Amino acid sequence: MTALRAPCGTILANGEAAAVSTLALGLATATVGATRLPAGLAGAEATALATAVGARVADDGAGGTVMTGRGLGGLTEPDAPLAVTDGAALAVLCGLLAGHSLTAVIDGAAPPDGLGALLADASATVLAAGDGTRAPVTVRGRAGLTAIPAPDDPAQEPWTLALARVSAGLAAAGTTTACLPPVLAAVVADLLRAFAVPCEAAPAGALIRLTVTGEAETTPAVLPPDWPTVPAWMAARRAGEAPVVLAIDGPAAAGKGTLARGMAERLGLAYLDTGLLYRATGMAVRRAGGDPDDPAAAEQAARALRPSDLAAPDLRGEAAGDAASRVASMEPVRAALLDFQRSFAHAPPDGAPGAVLDGRDIGTVVCPDADVKLFVTASPETRARRRFMELRERGQDVIESRVLQDMKERDARDSSRGIAPLVAADDAVVLDTSDLDRDGALAASLALVAACPRLNRDAASGYEDSADPRTVPAKTAGSNRPAGQ
């Protein structure tokens, strides 16, 4: 199988890639109509599985695969044992087959511990050879699975069982919830949304909690050639569509700046560090020979500000900080920079398809209509430690306890100020990065974005690719119900 690279840049492990491939082909098989899959996703083993349960598979003429599915409940019973060599792929396949009235024998990989008990909770049966831990495995599914209860401790459930839980939940009554590692959750959430499966994502410590609604009407998906590196929701956006706006707020040292830059880079969006605006304004006044304390000069500089001005290397220095403090309290300057931020968001520079803005009041004041709002935070102790290490690396002699105290005092001031207080927007998702490293926080944020309904309204409707029209089929209308039902 071709290596699969997640939107955050991490290459999925072999087991994860096999499980994702099996889930993608299973979704395609259980959806009426033609789904387009990129080259490498539909490997020989997964393709053979899909064909064995009734899907039609063809080359799309551009290196990818066209898979025509039968719909939920329309899978046929295989007339020979299915070959699966990866345990994670086996778990996903068992979950998918559990919601269909058929019996299938799967040979090759051994089932993960707990798989039989999980599917038994949904009224399906999984029987393994020997003491119940060896291949072959027999799955006896049934239409209309009962609601699958959540595990006692979702955070402790192995990801293989969590993904099997999601797979079975597609055909189960009600909603099914499972917790996945952020990198895997970002890929799975985007895949589910590409097929129009109702899916919600929420932070759960170092994991992402996914909730899917079963027995939903799905539609054929068109995954871009470089999926999952390029998410399906991003590829589905059309020329002329309104730019996507991602608002990232949070207190100091929560990691919002690093996260916002990473999101912009991975999604090909413009990035605005709003904290530089007042610095750039103050320094522009000084470069012109003016006084930052002059309201007229400061407003003129703010009105003349351009995105390229924010790349000046001297904006991180003490002189820029001093100049910023002088202009920040001037209402005309604040009004001018608010206009700048909104213009950047809704008309990103260089023709970017959207923008990521980070600050303290982006989701509440600057862009209250943002498509996605994240409020990135961490415990005061975690943030103080990060800032302490940052200052030490710069050669500054600081005391960590003092950094913590200063941070708590600043938080109190920012959250209680009368104008644009530091608070999460009512519709923002709060992402606590205390237990996440830089890569984990980025993957978690991308998973939350992938599950956002406002960004996925057209994710299953195809994508633009003028370089090769063969990969841009008209969307095939369909549902997850087999013909005649």
Image: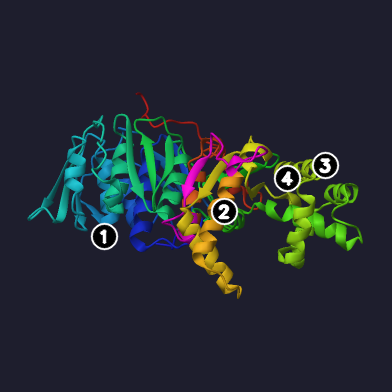
Q: CA distance from mark 3 to mark 4?
A: 14 Å
> In terms of image quadrants, where is residue 367?
top right
Residue 378 magenta: no
Which circle, 3 or 2, is nearer the viewer?
3
Looking at the rendering, the stretch of residues picked out in magenta corresponds to: 415-441
Q: CA distance from mark 1 to mark 3?
A: 66 Å
Image quadrant in which the N terminus is located:
bottom left
Residue marked by disc 1: 85
* Neighbourhood count class around disc 2 (C-alpha, 10 Å): few under 14, some 14–19, many 20 upward: many
First in sequence: mark 1 vs mark 3: 1
Q: Amino acid at mark 4?
A: Gln
CB-based contact (under 8 Å), mark 3 and mark 2: no
For the view shown, which residue lies furthest in the top direction? 485
Q: Amino acid at mark 1?
A: Thr
* Neighbourhood count class around disc 1 (C-alpha, 10 Å): few under 14, some 14–19, many 20 upward: some
- Identified at 46% across, 38% down, the residue is 220
